[in-house]
Image (cartoon, rainbow, N blue to C red):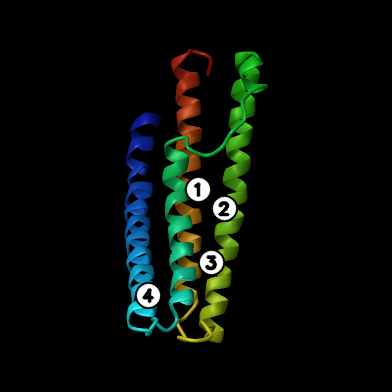
Amino acid sequence: MDLRTVSKKLGIFSTLLSYVGAAALFFMMLLTTVDVAGRYLANKPITGVFELTEYLVLILIFSFLAITQAQGGHVSVDLLLTRLPAKLRFAVNLINHVACLALMAVIFWMGFLNALESKAVGEGSPNLAIPKYPFVFFLALGCLILCIEYIRNIFNILADRKEDGQL
């Protein structure tokens, strides 16, 4: 199996996670609309809407990190990179993606450990007592899927280099 095939198969994870993020965004919009309508029309706001929104924002952010990386949507400044020779450009791209992969792997691992600790001590939100650990596990999952996207990017960089006959 070649690198491009592996890369395509790994792309399903970020797509699936983006659907979770879209659902979280929809629910957050619905919750905010109902809360505002209840507050101003019936003088009965939804209790704990701020806590729910905080958790939904966490889901939203970590759902779209990987798909944004897959689509090349993250901010990058390549003013200098485009002026470098091809071999150096390849090395910089590869080092950049490996460094990002390593950083996100550390964040994944620390998030996973934090979630286990949060579960063990029974941490929860102040008003609604919503357990914190499922959302920290979701943070770790989002970072793990972003790691998969960095691996895909590394595969693609190596495959491009191989197709050019330079690897």
Say left or right for 7 vs 135: left
Give the spatial CA distance, label 2 vs label 4: 38 Å
- Could you tell me which secondary element the residue under label 3 belongs to? helix
Considering only vertical position in the picture, is 157 above or below 39? Answer: above
Q: Which residue is mark 2?
A: 105
* Rendered-image quadrant of the N terminus: top left
Residue shown at the point (38%, 77%) measured from the top left: 40
Residue shown at the point (38%, 69%) measured from the top left: 32
> Do residues under tags 1 and 2 come within 8 Å of each other at their CB atoms?
yes
Task: Out of 22 and 146, give the one closest to the viewer.
Answer: 22
Pointer 3 or 1: first along the chain: 3
> Do residues under tags 3 and 1 come within 8 Å of each other at their CB atoms?
no
- Could you tell me which secondary element the residue under label 1 belongs to? helix
- Could you tell me which secondary element the residue under label 4 belongs to? helix
Q: Amino acid at mark 4?
A: Asp
Pointer 3 or 4: first along the chain: 4
Task: Out of 1 and 69, give the one closest to the viewer.
Answer: 69
Label of residue 147 in the image = 1
Say left or right for 109 vs 51: right
- Could you tell me which secondary element the residue under label 2 belongs to? helix
Residue shown at the point (34%, 58%) measured from the top left: 20
Q: Amino acid at mark 3?
A: Phe
